[in-house]
Amino acid sequence: MIAILLALACAKHPDTNMTHLTHPPEVAPAPAFTPVSPEVLALSNGVKLWYVHRPGLPLVSLQLVVPGGSATDPADAPGTASLTDSMLLEGAGDRTSSQFAAESDRLAIDISVATWGVASLASLDTHTDRLDEGLALFADAILRPRFDAADLDRVRESEVGDLKEAADDPRSVSAKVLDMLYYGDGHPLAHPVSGTIAGIEAITVEGLRTSWSQRFGAGHATLVVVGDVDKETLIAALDKHLGSWKGEGIQPSLTAPERSADGAQMYMVDHPGTSQTSLRVVMPAPALGHDHLVPAQLGSIVLGGTFTSRLNRLLREEKGYTYGARARVSAWPSHGTLSASTAVQQDVSAPALKDLLTELERYTEGVDGEELIKARSAKETRTIQAMTARSDVASIYATLAAGGQAPGDLNKGLTQARGTKIADIQAGIQASSLSQAVILVVGDLSEIRESVEAAVPGQWTVVPAPE
Amino acid sequence: MIPSILIAMTTNAHAIDIPHEQYQLDNGLNVILHEDHDLPQVVVNLWYGVGAKDEQPGRSGFAHLFEHLMFMGTVNLPGSGFDERMEAFGGWNNAWTSEDATDYYEAGPSNLLETFIWLEADRMRDLGRAMTQEKLDLQRDVVRNERRQGVEDTPYGIVWEALNPALYPPEHPYGHTVIGSHEDLMAATLGDVTSFFDTWYVPNNASLVIAGDFDSEQAKAWIEQYFGNIAKKDLPERRGVPIVDKPVQPTREETDNVALPMTLMTWHTPAAFQAGDAGNDLTASILGDGKASRMYERLVRNDKIAIEVDVWHYSQLLGSVFGISAKPADGHTVEEIEAAVLEEIARLAAEGPTDAEMERILNQTEVAFIQGLEGLQSRASALNRYRYMAGRPDFAESDLQRYRDLTKDDVKAAASKLTEDRVSRIRVRPEKKEDDQSQGTDKGSDQ
């Protein structure tokens, strides 16, 4: 009877030794993939248009990229670009703030503006049937913002509230202080995009108007549109609503931050009462357009870009110090950065920092073949997935536009990644040296200072938390 | 090619469908297949019908802790092999745990589908055999750090810690938080882990969705090959659910390391997909969606007593929650906000929504449905969520129809139950610091 039962079971699974259950299956070759590439067009007023026709769902996603961003903030009013961008949606054209919100809601369209360091990205997501009405409202926001004083007061109070909340969050404090220390006084990227409480409180209606008029010029804007609308209909609608847009815009002049190679600069910020300690390290990396950028990005995936990355595996999966650790490369035309970050339980702050720095040192020795394949595969998958939703496709190309890149650079980067070798990554990593790094520890110094200073000897400087 | 989503135009509305095939293996594993060949990618979503509501007393946080342990390796693929195997070829994964369920998902290029299926089947078959005290201790540390990061060191994190205990009695399945307490996490034993796995991680308590660029016949063969011989088991009786209509704590005062006070007002509402659930969703939208909403207009624009307000309705299997949170403007108090909130709700209950509000909400709901089903992962998740919460995966169109069918009276009925005698208020006030001469901006803290 037992023999019969076994025979029946085996009939279902011809692999009688059951190795199909004990060994993972072989993986077939990866499918071929080429990302969709936008058609490059222009409106009658010269605004660049990157267009992807994506039928199937009645949705259109639009992103308008305007160079500038928080790098254009006046020195005495950090946060001006961000607050200005928020105010674009607080009444425009003939509509008050309340009426603008009501009309946007009635149409079920989503208009938002994100401020980055060197650009602003205004987005419109709409049902195809309401594209024309949505564009009318969007154009009002971009071309005819009202900047009413009463609305400024209301939005300002909300922004100040957000900044106060961020000041209570050690990870937010850590991110802001790191940029201040790495870029140094006077650099356009040194201050937080969201500004400071003093800066936000100093901004006037006139300051908003100046920031808007300086940055929102048709001459340097790029529109990315992905969705269920044919080219002729789209261009006609864009020309109708944005065709009258004129003007040039200022472009911040960025330079690479000056970093001495004399050794890492080490800082602490006191944040009493926190149960975790935030650890961050930032150092140079290749700039946008540099041949070493793609290899450096792949290297950062190995270091801290996936769950099994070196940092996460060590600090989370082997030591249990943290909920997660990551690293990433960010790049601008003038420079790039490699940053690594984690938040660890307070009582292991010192050994965790030591482990983090040891891993960063080891990273300069390069990656192995398996790690390279993993990083290349991760980049491939991320690009495939970014092609799924219309808004994601628009975002990935808007990001290229914000960096001054061309649509073809997406596929170019993917092709370069596919051909990247271990030696290429080694070359990409060389730009990132701990000797040029800023190391920042944010936590309850009464509990951790002594052990951190003992674990990582050197010149530590305690800096005040930002307001 | 099968279109990923069918949208049929009717007179003035869209019908939404996610084409799929559903069947069950002999061992009870539910399988849902959804082909979409637009891009060379696949998503696997394995949904287990167990969540924090099924935890034993003194083991809060255990379902989520167990979710972490599912990635700690098996006899066949030890250590971090689960992640390493898929990441080597461009795959990635994650998981989440709620009060009601635990959901694991993988995504990657389509050549990884067989690997994804094998990996999920392998750990469903015998994760318990490879479990050790060392693994438990390690992931306990990770989860406690997740708790520190998400609750203790996050401004107002204490509110979410206090929410469930304020609404439900301790013996209720929702009477504790999903993340759990440090004390309970520390109390978890290896025996708890193997028992939990043997009890809940069985094929007849799971539903597997595969979505993306694959061949259904091939997928069926792999699913049978890898999951087919995992034994089904009888599931235990679920804990009884005490009926709760009013909060355990009408008012709860907390302090936190924050600069501004905040109030969170919550009410019990009907369970997900039950009568009244959709009406509460609509009511939340009318009251709080966007800067033209009633609460924003009243509290922020007109009365200027708050700097922000948030309104939500969180639908759950055993009973849902309606919530309104707000932070007072300088010189105003959480008590003023609470009074104004109750007035606005009472006005909506008495007068009902306007035609413009109904038009707005229905337009937004229709678009949100289309947008929400655009991504492959969201479609895979929706199929499993509908199957688990509503009883069938093809519920998307019926779900949208619930909102289309709502009337002004449904909104009035929902609002009429958001009353002062049923509310729970959690007030968070800034901790007093030794060098801080102010009392914050909330006059209420002086009273």
Image (cartoon, coloured by chain):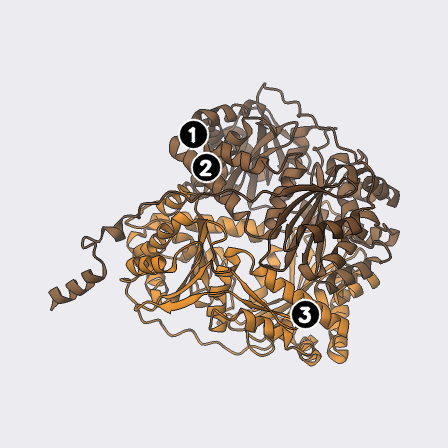
Secondary structure found at label 3: helix
Q: Residue at x 23, y 62 (%)?
A: A12
Per the rendering, the mark at residue A367 is 1
**Mark 2 Cα-neighbour bin, 10 Å: few <14, some 14–19, many ≥20:** many
Quadrant the C terminus of chain B occupies: bottom right
Position of B413 relative to B361 (above/below): below
**Mark 3 Cα-neighbour bin, 10 Å: few <14, some 14–19, many ≥20:** some
Q: Report x, y in % for residue B287.
A: 72, 68
Q: Nearer the viewer, mark 2 or mark 1?
A: 2
Q: Mark 2 — residue?
A: A375
Q: Residue at x 59, y 31 (%)?
A: A337
Which colour is chain B painted?
orange
Q: Are the residues tagged 2 and 1 within 8 Å (C-beta)?
A: yes
Residue A101 falls in which quadrant of the image? bottom right
User: How far apart, in angstroms, are the residues tagged by discs 2 and 3?
Assistant: 44 Å
Secondary structure found at label 1: loop
Q: Residue at x 84, y 51 (%)?
A: A153
Which colour is chain A painted?
brown
Per the rendering, the mark at residue B362 is 3
View extreme (top): residue: A262
